[in-house]
Amino acid sequence: DQEELVNSITADMQSILVTKLPLYEK
């Protein structure tokens, strides 16, 4: 399903961003 694929890619990108930007957001 295309939408599921997009959702999983988005989740991966978000977790990569969270890992690369350790605590700057908080």
Image (spheres, rainbow, N blue to C red):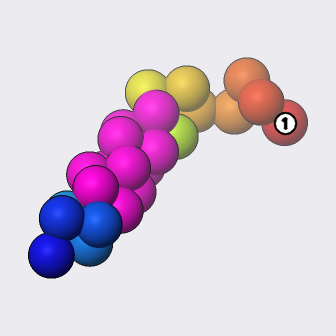
Q: Is residue 9 above or below residue 17?
A: below
- Quadrant in which residue 4 is drawn: bottom left
The residue to which callout 1 is attached is 26
Q: Residue at x 77, y 30 (%)?
A: 25
Q: Nearer the viewer, residue 7 or 22?
A: 7
Residue 16 appears in view: yes
Range drawn in magenta? 6-17
Q: Find residue 3 and report its horizontal and vertical position in percent.
A: 29, 66
Q: Nearer the viewer, residue 17 or 7?
A: 7
Q: Residue at x 18, y 65 (%)?
A: 2
Farthest-out residue, left:
1
Asked whether, in this view, residue 3 is left or right of residue 20, the answer is left
Specify the amino acid type for callout 1. Answer: Lys
Q: Is residue 11 magenta?
A: yes
Q: Residue at x 28, y 56 (%)?
A: 6
Q: Find residue 26 and report its horizontal and vertical position in percent.
A: 84, 36
